[in-house]
Amino acid sequence: MKRFIGSCITFVVILALIIIHSVSMVRLGNKIRDLSDKTEECVLNDDWEEASAYLSLIKDEWERKSIWTALTIKTDDIEQIDISLSQSEKYAKLKAKEQFMGEFTMFSKLVEHIPHQEGFHIEELL
């Protein structure tokens, strides 16, 4: 009976950690997507100072959660996101709109897939 109770407790703890991770990844993806939309809007309006401010917020959020994401996301995917964000920052400093939009779109798409890779969706069960 003690083994059964121990197994149930272990199962509940693992399930709770999975749910916490899933919710965290979905929130990260949503927050970065919202900031990305605002950044793109600023760039289209040639407001590079505001765009740089949003890029800093995106970078801070990514760095704050990157250790947590590294637990389950492939290293190659994380490196691609880091490189794409870094290049986007450099293009923003140069005010190179076309290059920025191309690289930032790549960054946005890579981040957009995080909740789908790590999050829990009912569609996957059906």
Image: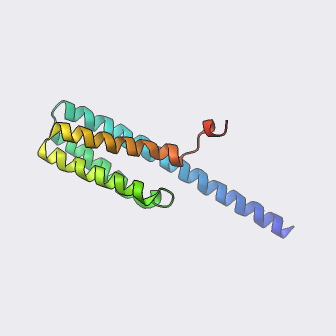
As rendered, which of 106 and 23 lies closer to the eye? 106
On screen, residue 54 versus residue 9, left or right, reads left
User: What residue appears at the point 50 percent right and 61 percent down from the top-left corner?
Assistant: 71
Q: Residue furthest left?
A: 94
Q: Residue furthest bottom?
A: 2
On screen, residue 79 versus residue 56, left or right, reads right
Reply above or below: 90 against 97: below
User: What residue appears at the point 63 percent right and 37 percent down from the top-left corner?
Assistant: 122
User: What residue appears at the point 50 percent right and 50 percent down from the top-left corner?
Assistant: 24
Q: Residue furthest right?
A: 1
Reply above or below: 17 against 46: below
Look at the image and name its color scheme: rainbow
User: What residue appears at the point 32 percent right and 35 percent down from the top-left corner?
Assistant: 37
Reply above or below: 66 against 88: below
Q: Position of residue 107 (x, y in %)?
A: 33, 45
On screen, residue 101 versus residue 79, left or right, reads left
Q: Position of residue 45 (x, y in %)?
A: 18, 30
* Residue 8, image quadrant: bottom right
* Residue 44, image quadrant: top left
As rendered, which of 76 and 10 lies closer to the eye? 76
Quadrant that contains the N terminus: bottom right
**Looking at the image, how many numbered discs can be counted on the residues?**
0
Quadrant that contains the C terminus: top right
Q: Position of residue 116 (x, y in %)?
A: 51, 43
Reply above or below: 86 against 101: below
